[in-house]
Image: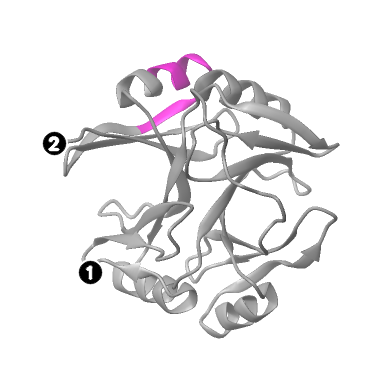
């Protein structure tokens, strides 16, 4: 069984624009957890829980977190495979976490299981239930995450579907862009990709791409939020 992806973070020097933007765009419930951190309940009933944090460096960020029993052991293994520690294992009252840059410099989080965290509540919000990693070399990137986290990577194509094997959290995709774009981000499941891209633009975001028909009855898109973080959207139509 692989490790689940259960959490995502968005960050900026000033969190207020992000709280306003995402709260209005996705109808998420935002709850202040600390002076520098706001917890997100997507009210999507599945996928990941998340948060919005204040950046200590001033740089914006988006990251998903992989839930592991021993963050230090996984961090050590990641470094042996070409990753670099960004945040060492840090223990806070509510969570123990760490962060690293993968071999392409993409930010990834690790966290220990949180007591009492049952995931997003049921409601009318948009679930964040997909993660995506686009590296410079699809095969290398897929191998890195497969070996580090024990994930089932569909096949060694330019873009491979990922089943973490954990039975909870988010599924995802790992590959490389034919345009040379690299990122590690998350996607929200929406009823209309164009509608949400337009709404994101109206709220101060910038369209990155989409809507794009990627096959399998799925359309995707992505935007940059008001501080520059890339965030994805997708819609799946059941056959």
Vertical arrangement, residue 198 with respect to residue 49, above or below:
above
Residue beneath the point at 41% across and 64% down? 164
Q: Which residues are magenta?
A: 198-208
Where's residue 41, x and y in %? 61, 34
Q: Position of residue 199 (x, y in %)?
A: 44, 17
| Number of the front mark, 2 or 1 | 2
N-terminal of the pair, mark 2 or mark 1, is: 1
Q: Are marks 2 and 1 in contact (CB under 8 Å)?
A: no
Against 89, residue 77 (above or below) is below
Residue 50 placement: quadrant: top right
In the image, what residue occupies the spot 67% across and 72% down? 71
Question: Is residue 87 rendered to the left or right of residue 125?
Answer: right
Which one is in front, 182 or 6?
Answer: 6
Kind of element beneath mark 2: loop
Position of 158 compared to 209: left or right?
left
Say whether residue 63 is visible: no
Query: As rendered, which of 112 and 156 lies closer to the eye?
Result: 112
Residue that numbered label 1 is attached to = 155
**In the rendered image, which quarter is residue 208 located in?**
top left
Decide if residue 214 is in sight here. yes
Residue designated by label 2: 239
Q: Is residue 238 magenta?
A: no
């Amino acid at each position: 069984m692989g490790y689940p992806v259960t959490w995502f973070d968005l960050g900026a020097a000033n969190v207020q624009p992000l709280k306003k933007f995402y709260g209005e765009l996705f109808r998420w419930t935002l709850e202040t957890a600390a002076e520098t951190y706001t917890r997100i309940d997507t009210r999507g009933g599945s996928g990941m829980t998340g948060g919005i944090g204040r950046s200590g460096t001033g740089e914006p960020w988006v990251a998903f977190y992989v839930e592991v029993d021993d963050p230090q052991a996984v961090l050590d293994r990641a470094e042996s495979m070409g990753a670099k520690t960004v945040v060492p294992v840090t223990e806070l009252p509510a969570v123990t976490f760490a962060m690293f840059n993968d071999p392409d410099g993409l930010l990834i989080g690790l966290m220990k299981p949180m007591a009492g965290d049952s995931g997003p509540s049921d409601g009318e919000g948009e679930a964040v239930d997909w993660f995506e990693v686009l590296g410079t070399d699809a095969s290398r990137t897929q191998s890195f995450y497969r070996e580090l986290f024990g994930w089932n990577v569909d096949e060694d194509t330019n873009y491979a579907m990922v089943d973490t094997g954990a039975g909870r959290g988010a599924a995802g995709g790992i590959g490389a862009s034919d345009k040379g774009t690299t990122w590690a981000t998350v996607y929200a499941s929406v009823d209309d990709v164009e509608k949400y891209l337009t709404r994101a633009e109206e709220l101060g975001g910038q369209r990155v791409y989409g809507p794009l028909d990627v096959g399998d009855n799925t359309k995707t898109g992505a935007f940059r939020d008001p501080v520059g973080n890339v965030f994805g959207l997708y819609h799946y139509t059941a056959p």
